[in-house]
Amino acid sequence: MLIILECTNSPIFFFSQKKKNTMEVCSFEKMHKLEKPDFQHRSKVRIASTMKEIVFGMEDGMVSTLGAITGIATGSQDHSIVLLSGFVIIAVESISMGIGSYLSNKSEIDISMRTIHEEQYEIDYFLDEEREELVEMYTGDGWPPKLAKQMAEVASQNRDLILKEMAYRELQIIPESLENPWKKGFFMSGAYVLGGAVPLLPYVFSTKLSFALSLSILLTLIGLFLLGVYTTKYSKRNWLRAGMEMLIFATLAALIGYAVGAAVNAYQS
């Protein structure tokens, strides 16, 4: 039989009648059989790794397309020109954004792999120096010096293990996290198409430019807000703040772009 003296989120102390005068410690989690929260890092869904491409692509798709077709609609007053221009802009920009994402991520991976290759060379030919560096990094992280030396010694006996440790700690590279650049390029391109479709759809279903223009702006503003809200599914931020942040900054960018376009058109005319 156990007599519980304290019950908090900190460790719980209790006395065991089997061993008198002996105080044992039991964690709160074991006492109550708590289940671990469903944190994002434990999720099998890895969409968070491409969140940058999704948010960037959709935001740029909505803002760029809205600014372009709004300027074209205002200047041309021709529904067919607006519609054609919108499809061309989305097609060209989505491909460009996807290729740009692929090339930038591939370059980053190439640089990381080259750096790891150089580290492998140092391990192969200057193992003692690398072991000492590893000890210094362990102790710098707060490990006791004696334990740090033991850990470095064990790691140095395995070329793959010490390479992984040096990549993590010295190069700050996690090889497992280097994802396929084609995947990120695909997400970027697809996100741009989805984002660009939001301001263009009103022109598809309505030939009345004034109505389509107003609806296009309204839907884009709503879309930007919802995109900000969507990110809170993974960031766990306040949904209203995230939505307003996306809406304000993206709208500001759209207004600046539209103002520059209007000024150029006015100057040329």
Image (cartoon, grey):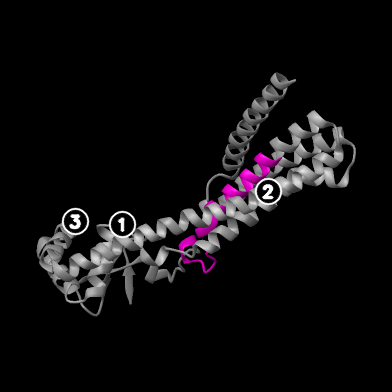
Q: Distance between the residues labelled 1 and 2?
A: 34 Å
Magenta segment includes 45: yes
Q: Residues within 10 Å of mark 2 (few under 14, many from 20)?
A: many
Inspect the image, locate mark 1, and give the three-letter code of the amino acid beneath it: Gln
Q: Distance between the residues labelled 3 and 2?
A: 47 Å
Q: In terms of secondary structure, where does tag 2 sit?
A: helix
Q: In terms of depth relative to the viewer, which is nearer, 79 or 195? A: 79
Q: In terms of depth relative to the viewer, which is nearer, 145 or 34? A: 145
Numbered tag placed on residue 172 in the rendering: 1
In percent of the image, x 15 and y 59: which residue is there? 133
The magenta-colored residue range is: 40-65
Numbered circles on residues, count:
3
- Find disc 2 in the rendering and name its residue: 195
Q: Quadrant of the C terminus?
A: top right
Magenta segment includes 155: no
Numbered tag placed on residue 142 in the rendering: 3
Q: How crowded is mark 1: few (under 14 residues within 10 Å), some or many (20 or more)?
A: few
Q: In terms of secondary structure, where does tag 3 sit?
A: loop
Left or right: 38 as drawn, with respect to 178: right
In percent of the image, x 70 and y 51: which residue is there? 91
Give whichever of discs 3 and 2 has the lower sequence position.
3
Q: Is residue 109 above or below residue 203?
A: below
Q: In terms of secondary structure, where does tag 1 sit?
A: loop
Q: In terms of depth relative to the viewer, which is nearer, 63 or 83? A: 83
Q: Distance between the residues labelled 1 and 3?
A: 17 Å
- The answer to whether residue 21 is visible is no
